[in-house]
Structure formats: structure tokens, C-alpha cells
Image: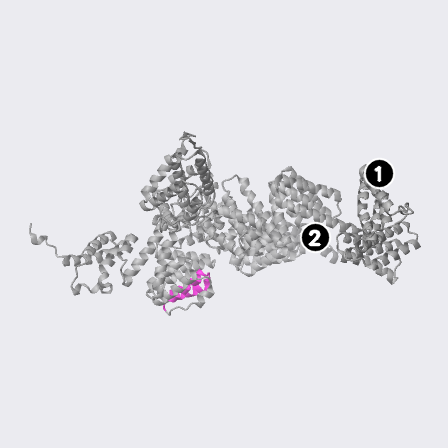
């Protein structure tokens, strides 16, 4: 063998290695990159000539360390990454060091969650606190850049130091406006709208995205929608983020059709995106679009079956099939993947309710509330559970909580009204129904309840007024949001009877005629029509008798009778 | 899928125990102690010394096993406190072992756990080297559980346990210097729960139980509301599944009258309660709903929301009735009694009878007490009321309901007080002035002179103004009472002359209107007042005469008594005369002394006290010789 061929030119090797590392990194060949970086690090004492150093000048002499650390980071060997970067001072390597330490702590915490038998580890938070203290020191020396500030904020948030975290995130944003993660964390931390308005934010195009996102977090749907629409027009119409957010806004505004359309658009643009699709499945569930939901579940499970969204979608699908036990199973799986996943707790509560397992339902709802005290659906669910247990007074507290959190949601107010009605607090019940009507009355139930309550109180005029309004609204919407047809026909029947008793035969006739359109009220309608005809005849008879004694009345009566008879038997 | 109905939404709860550092140390201590008992050193001790050591450590171990986890320093100081020659050997061994665990690490820990598992305590009641290990002793039970739960740990869990043990070790003085030891400490410190981030379930339960008990029975001793709140919050972080913590929080909120907090905690508590007994029979689950409503009623009652309380209570009653849960119904019934105004007698009667039937002693006793109160307020028969109260006492003592026992005492004393006033007041509907007099009389006995005076004055001022003519006897009685009041207020400092004037004028009325009975009554009072005056302020001569008169009264009165009592009275009277004689002798009223001696001699003769009689007669004779008097028979008629 030739000895000269054996001799390796380390400079040449290093040039090749650095090139290889860049190429592999760009292609996501992390393990290969790791091998190359390790080798490169082993010869880090070799210096390259000037012309080869152009792309890593920002690293100074830390480029080799950076490469090896980054490769360890990419393959999730955080402790190793932190170890190699422990002495680094340059911004990127420093951030990598701190971030890998943080991720290592979090990863271990997640891994240890399965170790249920050991004592609650008092050291668990000490490590995080130590890291936090280190960052705090740098923070006070003003040595943190925007990225490190963000990391500091994240750790503060983990330690429940919310107000401090908000300040730090704002600083991070000012220093590095493009860091969306900081904006996002900030939006999730804000306690209310006022705090949002009081923030001093940098004037940057990304601010609009933040505001829209933050408004949505605060459930200020209108403000949010406005900004998203503007962004959409300004050329971001392809952004799947904006489309998804718009869909959620529509969902929150209960504009179900629009929301579904937007989600469909999102899926066609970005078919493998799973985020927020659980909301879509909720929508499909509410609209009872079984086959669409089935398709969605199919797609989701083939993309990634170990995602909370997927589990949630499947859960919803089983639920719509009334296979509640299986639905519960999938919600449980979602919770195993993420115990903090709020809506799964609530949805599981609903399933247990369907299965008449009130205990488990209460437990699920309570869990949801423990995670987020503001989850109105869980409060409402608890109210329903206790209502089923026939404890109207006890459940009122829950409905009140729910109503407090959703002051303009008519469903909560109606639930409250019904409870009052059960407790014989008629005045309060009436107040609730009126309030529900005035805040929009999504399902139109407020008027029905009002009508039946007035009827019960024998205030027939008021009852009739309520039913009339209900029928008018129903006709307007033509059943789009008003699913329950039977209520409509019952109202019609009531109105027919009411007008009949008042002697207003024409009105009674119109309503009774409408009753014929429904199977349930058909018989009643027919009977009503007969009575109307009879009464009308009777009345005219009397009128005729009193007015005319020549005997014309007979033909008259016959005429009217025939005409009504014709109308009765004409096909509806 | 059929049984998924009963599946809990969260992971199935296992009753698990954590291997805490404290438990490891206690196990190590037991291990070393067992070794010591087998050692030569121990065997060389005398029998009594050995027993002493064993007794001290058995007590200490029991304490350590049953108490909450404590710091290593505290444990060591408890050990140091044992006073025994061989104690130091044991402590050194334990310290060495602990040190090895920390320095050598996981291999040593696992080895030592194995050795603990092979201790003789696990063998069937063997008699080994003179000692008997009993398999089902407290210590053995503790060790067995420890071994079983340690065995369940995965390797990574063992590492976590070891890490936490190191942490525990580093906080003690052992880590700094092996030679310094903590100061001796006799007791477990009472505030073991302070500054605590980690709570084991057992500790949490102990804390909740003690604090709840204090809140109910001795609020002053409990933690302050703010501290308690902090502790509960802290405790809930690691022990989310204890509904009782929320109930304690509820009690704490009640203490500071925070309605919102109270109601929130109460609801939280009962939502959680339904889940913890999720594995029990269905009836148990539904049971908690009823009691939730019942407790809601109690909450509203506490905040004086009567209507809300009643609504909630009705709900509880209705749900209880549906499944005929008599226990809940009885609880509800006793609350209903507090909340409602109609048919109370029937409610409480029913409550008592039904509670008796289903053995709810507390409610029954409480019911009886309430019944007593109710009866008292609504003219029940006093005799019967007290009879019922006695029955309540009986139950309380049987079941040692301490709070009810004290409650009963309060009730009885207030009933007694109430009756006096109530009867006197009731008379006023028939006769206002009679009532007035009776009230005055009662107040006099209660030493409430102001009120008594006021009552009497009502009558007397009317008389003086002449607006109203009374029956003369009422006026006289009022005057007598007034005299009594004055007498009582001024006694024993002085007797105001006004009293006698008053009595005299009433005497005049009496004789004018021929009220023979009241005449003598007034005279009695005059006598009393005068006797008081004489005895308090008179000279020896007068005092002697007064005493003599008193003795004569006693003798006169003794006639109506039984033979035996009469003899005793006579004897006493005769002895009392000694005093009178002494007074007379001091002022040398010899004829008087002779009179007294004569009387004494006759009295002693009457009761057959021969020696006393003879003594008196002899003295009389000596006296008579020295100071002869003409008339010796004035005794009876003279004062």
C-alpha cells in the first residue's frame, strides 16, 4: 500500500465534513448529520483557510460545537446537547444550550408520568427553578436576546409566574418581533381584554395576526373576524392558519354553515393538517352530518392515529352513532395523550350522560372545570346531570355559573328559566325567557317556553302572543336552525284552539289548516276544522235567525257549510 | 362493552402507598434494631436492661410508623432521646447504614431492602434467640407493606426514590458533618405540616381530620383562616382526589362567612365525593346526591337564607323519600324543624321516634333537646319536659356525645330560669298585680334587686298617688317585699331605720283591716329585722338576750317535730345558750346567767344529757351562792 495515499489531509476532510453536514441537515438526515458532526468535532483543532469560513462567521470558533450540538438536539438527545454547549457564549449556541436543558426537563417529566409508584418528587421543580434562576441572572444583566427572553417567559409560565411571564414575552416581542411563538404564548396568557388593550406592542405587521389571535382567545369573535378578513384580502388568503382561525370564529358565532364551509376549504387547501379539526368534527356532530363525520374520522386516523384531534373526531363519530361506550374509550385515549386536553373531558361527560352514568359524567365535568374554571360547557353539563337526578335547586348553581360565563347565550338562560319554573319561581322563569329572547334565542326555545308557561298560568293572550311570534320566526327561518318541527306544529295547534275560543274563526282556520302538514297534529287539525265549521255555522245560524226570518237562512247555511267542507277535504 | 358503564373516566384508582424516604429510614431502623437484638453485645445485658431497651424502641417505632413523615434530623433526635447504654451503638449503626445508602447508591439500597425482606419477623412466630417475632404485629405489618410496595417499583422509580432519599439526606445534619447531632427532641413538633410542599395521602387525611375536628369543637385551636386556606390549597396540589379537603375548605369559608367560597367548595366536594366512591354499590353513589342537597340547605341556613335553605331541604327530602333513605330523612327532618314554623311539635316528635327506630342516637338526642326547648316555649308540662331531657342525657352518656351533653346542661339551666319568669308573667293575664308581686319575689331570689324594686314600686307608687284602690293585702305584701328588698340590699352593713317604719306602717294597715295572717307575717319580719339589728350592733347584754330569745323560739318550735329531731334541736339550743351565757357573764349580769343556766339544765334534762345537766346545775349552785337573787322564775316570761 502506498503510504502517501494513506495520509489523510485533515483540512480537506474538514471541508468535506462541513459541506456534508449542511447538505444532510437541509435534507433532514439527522442521524447522518450527527455522525458527521461528531467526526467534525473530533478535529475541531483544525483551522480552515479564510475562504471556507464565510458561512459560519457568526459562530466564531463555536461552529464545530454548534454542529454537534444541533445534531444531538435534532435527534432529541437534549442532555448531550446541553453538555457540549455548556461553555458557549454566542447567541445561537447559548440558546441551544438553555433550550435543550429546558426540553430535557420537560421530556423527563413526561416520561416519569408513568412512574406512579414513587414519591412525589420534590426535586422535580427544583431543576426548573435552577434554570429559571440562571436565566433571571442573565435577564437582570440584560444579556438575554429575544429568543432567550422567550424561553425565560416559557419557564416563568411553567412556574405559574404569569404576570412576570407576560412582561418578559412583551420584551421578547419588542426585541424580536418575528418570533411568533412569543406572541402566541402572550395571547394565551392574557387574563382579559383590558390587559390586551393596555399592552405596549411594537408596530410590526405581525401585530395584526397577534391581535386577531388574542381577540379570539378572549372570545371577542367580531373583532377577530374583522382583522382576519382584512388579512385575507391583503393577500394572505392561502394561509391555512387564517382559514382555520376564521372557521373557529364562525363556530363561536354559531354560524354553523359558514364554519363548515370554511373548514372544507381548509381541508382542500391543506389535506393533512389535523390541528383544529376536532372543532370541525363538533360542527359536523351538531349538524348531524353523519357521513361527513365518518369521512373525516377515516382521513384523520390514516394521517396519525395517535393525535388528540384524531381521537376526538373518532369519539364524536361513535357518539353520533349512539355507540357511547366506544366514544368514551376514544375520549379516554385522547386524555391519555394529553391529560390537559379540556374538551375531551367535557365531551366524555356528555357521553357518560348519554349512558346514564351520572357519576362518571359528574367526575368528567368536574375534571374539565379543574383544568379550566371558565369552561361553560362543563358547568352546563353538570347542571344537566343534576337536573336529570331531579335536583332542580341544586343544579341551579351550575346553570348560574354557566350563564355567568356566557351571558348572552340563550341556552344557559333557558336552562335557568326551566329550573326556576320547576321550583315554581314563575317570575324569575319569565324573566329568564324574556332575557333569552332578547339575546338572540338561537334555537327559538325561549318563545315556546314562554308560551307554555303562560298557558300554564292561564294567561292565554300572552301565550298566544309568544306562540305567534315563534311561528313567524319559524316561517322566516324555514327550519334551518329550528330543528324541532313538533314544537312548531304544537304551537300552531295551540293558536288554532286559541282563536277558535275567541271566536276568531278565520285565524283559527288558517292555523288549523297548517296543522294538517304534520302527522302528529293532523288528527287534531281535522278535529279543529270540524269544530270551526260547526261553530261558524252555529253562529251564522243565530245571526241569520235574528236578522232574517224569511227562510233564506237554510240555503245560506248550506252554502257556507259546503264551502268549508270543500276546504277541509282539499288536499293539503 | 356492557361493563364499561362502570369504568371511571380516569385511570382506575389503586390504593397505593409511596415509598417515602421516611419509610425507608424507619425500615432501616427496624432492621438494625433486629440485628442488635441478635448481637452478643445485647445478650450480655441484664434482663431488665434488655427489656428497657426493647420497650423504649417499640414505643418509638410505633410512634414513627403512625405519625406523619418527619425530617431525618427529627427522627435522629427522637432516637437520641432514648436513654440507654447501648443506644449509641444502634444510632451509629443506623447512621452508617443511611450514609452507605447515599454514598454507595442503588446497589446498596437494593441489597439492604433484600436483607430487610429476610428478617426473622417474616417467619412464622419463631422463637429465636429468646425473642418472639409476631407476624401480625404493627411493625411486621408495616415492613411487609413496605417490602411489597418497594417490590412494585420499576428500576426508574427506584432511581427516583433514591434521588429523593438523597435530597432528604442532604437536608439533614448528617450530610454536613457526621459527628454533630441535632439537639434532643422529645416530641414530634406540632406544626409538622408547615412549609410542606409534598403531602402523602395519609398525612393529608390526618391534617384534614384534626383541623376539621378543631373547627367543630375548638375553633380557637385551629389554624387561622388564612393559614388553613393556604395549607388546603397546597395539599390539594398533590392530593387532588380527597373530597374532604374541599369540605374542610368549606368549613373554613363558613368561619369567615364567605358565601361564594363556601358554596363553591361545597359543590366541588360533592362532585368529587360521587367519584371517589364510584366503585361502591349504586345506592352509595346516589346517596351522596341527597346529602349534597342537605348540606346545601345547611349552608344556606348558616347564611340565614331561610327560603333557599328550605327549597334545598325539600329537594333533599324528596330525593330521600324516593328511595326511602330514612337516615337522610331524619337528618333532613331535624333541619326542617329549625327552618319551619308550622307543625313543629309533630315534626320533632316524629323525628325522635323514627331516629330511635333506626338507631340514630345523635339525632334522637338532639331531637329530644329541641323538643325540650320547644315544649318550654309553648307551655309544655315542665315535669314531662325534664323527664324527656333526662332521657336525652342518658343517650348522650351512652354514646358520649360530648357536645350534646354540654348542650343539655345549658338547656336545662335556661329552662329553669325561663320557667320562673314564664309562670310569673303568665299570671299577669289573670291578675296584673299578683304577677307584679310574684315577679318581684322571683327577682329578689335572683338577687336582681333593681328589677324587683321596680316591680314593687309599680304597685306602691300607684297607692301613693291614690289613683287606684288595691286590695289591701296586695299593698301590704308589696310593702313587706319592699322591706325585704331594702333589707337584702343593705345587709350586713347596716339596717336602715326606714325598714322598720315601713314594716310598722304595714303592721298598722294589717291591724286596721284585721288581716291577722299578715299581721303575724309583718311581725315576723320586724322580729327578723330587729334581731339582725341587735345581733349586729347591740351590746353584749342585748345580744345575750336576743340569743336567749332565739333559743326559746327553737324550743317552742321543736314541739311539732318528731321525737328524735326534737331532741337534737333541744340539745343544739342548749348548747347555743352557752354563747348567751358568755355574753351575760362578761357584763356580770349574774341573775341572767343563772336564768340561762337554769334553762340549759332543764333542756339537757329533757334530752337526757345527764353530765351536761349536772355541770349546769353545779354552776348554778355556785353562782346562786355567790350572787343570790330573789326571783329565779322570770326566765320564761322575760325576754
Q: Which residue is mark 1?
A: B605
Overall secondary structure of the magenta stretch?
helix
Q: Mark 1, mark 2: which one is toward the viewer?
A: 1
Q: Which residues are magenta?
A: A204-233
Q: Position of residue A485 (x, y in %)?
A: 54, 51
Q: Position of residue B20 (x, y in %)?
A: 41, 45
Secondary structure state at the residue bearing disc 2 = helix
Badge 2: residue crowd in 10 Å (few <14, some 14–19, many ≥20): few
Q: Is residue A443 visible?
A: no
Between B558 and B580, which is closer to the camera in this rendering? B580
Residue at position x 6%, y 49% in the image: A1
Query: Residue A371 colored magenta?
Result: no
Badge 1: residue crowd in 10 Å (few <14, some 14–19, many ≥20): some
**Residue A538's disc number:** 2
Question: How far is disc 1 from disc 2 in space, using C-alphas?
Answer: 124 Å
Between B375 and A530, which is closer to the camera in this rendering? B375
Residue at position x 72%, y 43% in the image: B386
Amino acid at each position: 500500500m502506498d503510504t502517501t495515499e494513506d495520509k489523510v489531509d485533515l483540512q480537506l476532510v474538514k471541508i468535506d465534513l462541513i459541506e456534508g453536514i449542511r447538505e444532510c441537515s437541509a435534507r433532514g438526515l439527522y442521524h447522518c448529520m450527527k455522525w458527521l458532526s461528531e467526526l467534525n468535532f473530533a478535529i475541531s483543532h483544525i483551522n480552515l483557510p479564510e475562504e471556507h469560513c464565510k458561512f459560519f462567521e457568526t459562530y466564531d470558533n463555536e461552529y464545530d460545537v454548534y454542529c454537534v450540538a444541533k445534531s444531538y438536539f435534532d435527534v432529541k438527545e437534549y442532555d448531550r446537547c446541553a453538555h457540549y454547549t455548556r461553555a458557549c457564549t454566542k447567541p445561537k449556541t447559548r440558546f441551544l444550550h438553555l433550550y435543550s436543558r429546558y426540553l430535557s426537563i420537560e421530556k423527563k417529566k413526561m416520561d416519569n408520568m408513568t412512574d406512579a409508584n414513587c414519591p412525589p418528587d420534590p426535586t422535580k421543580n427544583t431543576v426548573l427553578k435552577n434554570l429559571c434562576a440562571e436565566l433571571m441572572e442573565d435577564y437582570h444583566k440584560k444579556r438575554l436576546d429575544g429568543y432567550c427572553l422567550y424561553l425565560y417567559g416559557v419557564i416563568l409560565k411553567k412556574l405559574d409566574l404569569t404576570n412576570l411571564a407576560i412582561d418578559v414575552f412583551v420584551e421578547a416581542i419588542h426585541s424580536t418581533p418575528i418570533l411568533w411563538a412569543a406572541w402566541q404564548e402572550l395571547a394565551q396568557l392574557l387574563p382579559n381584554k383590558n390587559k390586551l388593550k393596555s399592552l405596549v406592542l411594537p408596530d410590526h405587521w405581525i401585530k395584526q395576526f397577534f391581535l386577531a389571535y388574542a381577540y379570539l382567545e378572549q372570545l371577542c369573535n367580531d373583532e377577530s373576524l374583522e382583522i382576519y378578513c382584512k388579512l385575507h384580502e391583503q393577500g394572505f388568503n392561502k394561509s391555512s392558519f387564517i382559514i382555520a382561525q376564521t372557521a373557529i370564529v364562525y363556530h363561536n358565532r354559531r354560524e354553523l354553515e359558514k364554519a363548515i364551509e370554511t373548514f372544507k376549504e381548509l381541508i382542500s387547501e391543506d389535506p393533512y393538517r389535523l390541528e383544529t379539526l376536532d372543532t370541525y368534527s363538533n360542527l359536523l356532530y351538531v349538524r348531524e352530518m353523519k357521513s361527513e363525520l365518518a369521512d373525516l374520522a377515516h382521513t384523520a386516523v390514516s394521517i396519525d392515529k395517535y393525535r388528540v384531534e384524531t381521537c376526538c373526531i373518532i369519539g364524536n363519530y361513535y357518539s353520533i352513532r349512539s355507540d357511547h361506550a366506544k366514544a368514551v374509550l376514544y375520549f379516554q385515549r385522547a386524555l391519555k395523550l394529553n391529560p390537559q386536553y379540556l374538551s375531551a373531558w367535557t365531551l366524555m361527560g356528555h357521553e357518560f350522560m348519554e349512558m346514564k352514568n351520572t357519576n362518571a359524567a359528574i367526575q368528567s365535568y368536574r375534571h374539565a372545570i379543574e383544568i379550566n374554571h371558565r369552561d361553560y360547557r362543563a358547568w352546563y353539563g353538570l347542571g344537566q346531570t343534576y337536573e336529570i337526578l331531579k335536583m332542580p335547586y341544586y343544579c341551579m348553581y351550575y346553570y348560574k355559573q354557566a350563564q355567568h360565563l356566557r351571558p348572552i347565550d340563550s341556552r344557559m338562560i333557558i336552562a335557568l328559566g326551566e329550573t326556576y319554573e320547576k321550583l315554581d319561581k314563575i317570575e324569575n322563569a319569565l324573566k329568564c325567557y324574556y332575557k333569552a329572547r332578547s339575546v338572540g334565542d338561537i334555537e327559538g326555545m325561549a318563545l315556546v317556553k314562554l308560551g307554555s308557561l303562560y298557558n300554564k298560568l292561564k294567561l292565554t293572550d300572552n301565550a298566544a302572543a309568544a306562540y305567534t311570534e315563534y311561528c313567524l320566526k319559524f316561517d322566516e327561518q324555514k327550519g334551518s336552525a329550528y330543528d324541532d318541527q313538533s314544537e312548531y306544529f304544537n304551537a300552531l295547534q295551540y293558536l288554532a284552539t286559541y282563536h277558535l275560543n275567541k271566536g276568531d274563526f278565520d285565524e283559527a282556520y288558517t292555523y288549523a289548516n297548517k296543522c294538517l302538514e304534520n302527522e302528529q297534529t293532523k288528527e287534531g287539525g281535522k278535529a279543529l276544522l270540524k269544530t270551526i265549521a260547526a261553530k261558524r255555522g252555529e253562529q251564522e245560524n243565530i245571526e241569520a235567525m235574528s236578522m232574517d226570518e224569511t227562510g233564506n237562512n237554510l240555503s245560506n247555511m248550506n252554502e257556507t257549510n259546503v264551502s268549508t267542507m270543500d276546504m277541509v277535504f282539499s288536499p293539503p | 362493552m356492557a361493563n364499561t358503564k362502570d369504568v371511571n373516566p380516569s385511570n382506575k384508582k389503586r390504593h397505593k402507598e409511596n415509598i417515602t424516604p421516611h419509610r425507608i429510614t424507619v425500615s432501616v431502623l427496624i432492621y438494625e434494631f433486629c440485628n442488635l437484638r441478635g448481637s452478643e453485645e445485647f445478650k450480655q445485658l441484664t434482663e431488665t436492661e434488655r427489656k428497657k431497651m426493647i420497650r423504649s424502641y417499640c414505643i418509638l417505632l410505633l410512634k414513627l410508623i403512625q405519625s406523619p413523615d418527619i425530617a431525618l434530623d427529627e427522627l435522629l433526635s427522637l432516637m437520641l432521646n432514648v436513654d440507654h447504654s447501648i443506644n449509641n451503638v444502634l444510632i451509629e449503626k443506623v447512621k452508617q447504614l443511611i450514609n452507605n445508602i447515599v454514598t454507595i447508591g442503588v446497589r446498596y439500597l437494593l441489597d439492604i431492602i433484600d436483607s430487610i425482606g429476610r428478617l426473622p419477623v417474616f417467619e412464622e412466630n419463631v422463637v429465636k434467640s429468646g425473642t418472639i417475632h409476631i407476624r401480625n404485629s404493627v411493625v411486621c405489618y408495616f415492613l411487609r407493606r413496605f417490602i411489597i410496595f418497594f417490590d412494585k417499583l420499576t428500576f426508574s422509580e427506584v432511581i427516583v426514590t433514591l434521588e429523593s432519599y438523597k435530597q432528604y439526606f442532604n437536608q439533614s445534619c448528617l450530610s454536613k458533618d457526621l459527628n454533630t447531632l441535632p439537639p434532643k427532641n422529645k416530641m414530634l413538633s406540632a406544626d409538622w405540616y408547615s412549609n410542606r410542599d409534598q403531602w402523602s395521602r395519609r398525612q393529608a387525611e390526618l391534617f384534614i381530620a384534626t383541623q376539621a375536628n378543631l373547627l367543630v369543637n375548638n375553633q380557637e385551636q385551629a389554624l387561622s383562616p388564612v393559614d388553613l386556606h393556604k395549607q388546603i390549597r397546597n395539599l390539594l396540589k398533590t392530593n387532588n382526589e380527597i373530597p374532604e379537603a374541599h369540605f374542610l375548605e368549606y368549613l373554613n369559608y363558613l368561619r369567615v362567612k364567605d358565601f361564594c367560597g363556601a358554596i363553591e367548595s361545597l359543590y366541588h366536594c360533592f362532585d368529587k365525593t360521587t367519584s371517589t366512591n364510584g366503585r361502591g354499590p349504586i345506592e352509595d353513589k346516589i346517596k351522596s346526591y341527597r346529602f349534597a342537597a342537605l348540606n346545601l340547605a345547611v349552608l344556606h341556613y348558616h347564611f340565614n337564607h331561610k327560603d333557599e335553605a328550605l327549597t334545598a331541604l325539600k329537594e333533599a327530602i324528596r330525593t330521600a323519600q324516593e328511595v326511602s333513605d330514612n337516615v337522610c330523612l331524619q337528618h333532613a327532618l331535624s333541619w326542617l324543624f329549625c327552618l319551619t314554623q308550622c307543625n313543629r311539635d309533630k315534626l320533632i316528635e316524629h323525628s325522635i321516634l323514627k331516629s330511635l327506630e333506626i338507631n340514630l342516637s345523635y339525632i334522637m338526642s338532639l331531637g329530644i333537646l329541641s323538643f325540650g326547648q320547644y315544649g318550654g316555649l309553648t307551655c309544655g308540662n315542665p315535669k314531662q319536659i325534664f323527664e324527656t331531657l333526662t332521657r336525652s342525657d342518658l343517650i348522650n352518656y351512652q354514646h358520649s356525645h360530648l357536645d350534646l351533653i354540654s348542650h343539655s346542661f345549658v338547656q336545662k339551666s335556661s329552662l329553669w330560669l325561663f320557667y320562673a319568669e314564664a309562670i310569673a308573667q303568665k299570671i299577669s293575664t289573670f291578675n296584673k298585680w299578683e304577677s307584679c308581686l310574684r315577679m318581684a319575689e322571683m327577682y329578689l331570689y335572683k338577687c336582681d334587686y333593681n328589677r324587683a324594686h321596680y316591680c314593687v314600686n309599680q304597685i306602691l307608687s300607684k297607692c301613693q298617688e291614690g289613683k287606684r284602690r288595691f286590695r289591701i293585702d296586695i299593698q301590704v305584701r308589696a310593702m313587706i317585699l319592699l322591706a325585704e328588698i331594702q333589707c337584702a340590699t343593705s345587709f350586713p352593713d347596716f339596717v336602715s331605720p326606714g325598714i322598720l317604719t315601713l314594716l310598722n306602717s304595714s303592721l298598722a294597715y294589717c291591724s286596721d283591716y284585721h288581716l291577722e295572717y299578715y299581721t303575724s307575717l309583718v311581725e315576723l319580719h320586724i322580729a327578723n329585722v330587729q334581731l339582725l339589728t341587735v345581733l349586729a350592733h347591740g351590746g353584749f347584754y342585748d345580744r345575750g338576750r336576743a340569743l336567749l330569745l332565739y333559743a326559746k323560739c327553737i324550743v317552742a318550735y321543736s314541739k311539732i317535730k318528731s321525737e328524735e329531731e326534737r331532741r337534737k334541736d333541744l340539745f343544739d339550743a342548749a348548747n347555743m345558750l352557752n354563747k348567751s351565757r358568755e355574753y351575760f357573764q362578761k357584763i356580770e349580769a349574774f341573775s341572767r346567767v343563772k336564768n340561762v343556766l337554769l334553762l340549759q339544765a332543764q333542756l339537757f334534762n329533757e334530752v337526757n344529757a345527764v353530765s351536761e345537766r349536772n355541770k349546769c346545775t353545779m354552776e348554778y349552785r355556785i353562782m346562786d351562792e355567790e350572787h343570790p337573787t330573789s326571783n329565779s322564775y322570770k326566765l320564761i316570761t322575760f325576754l
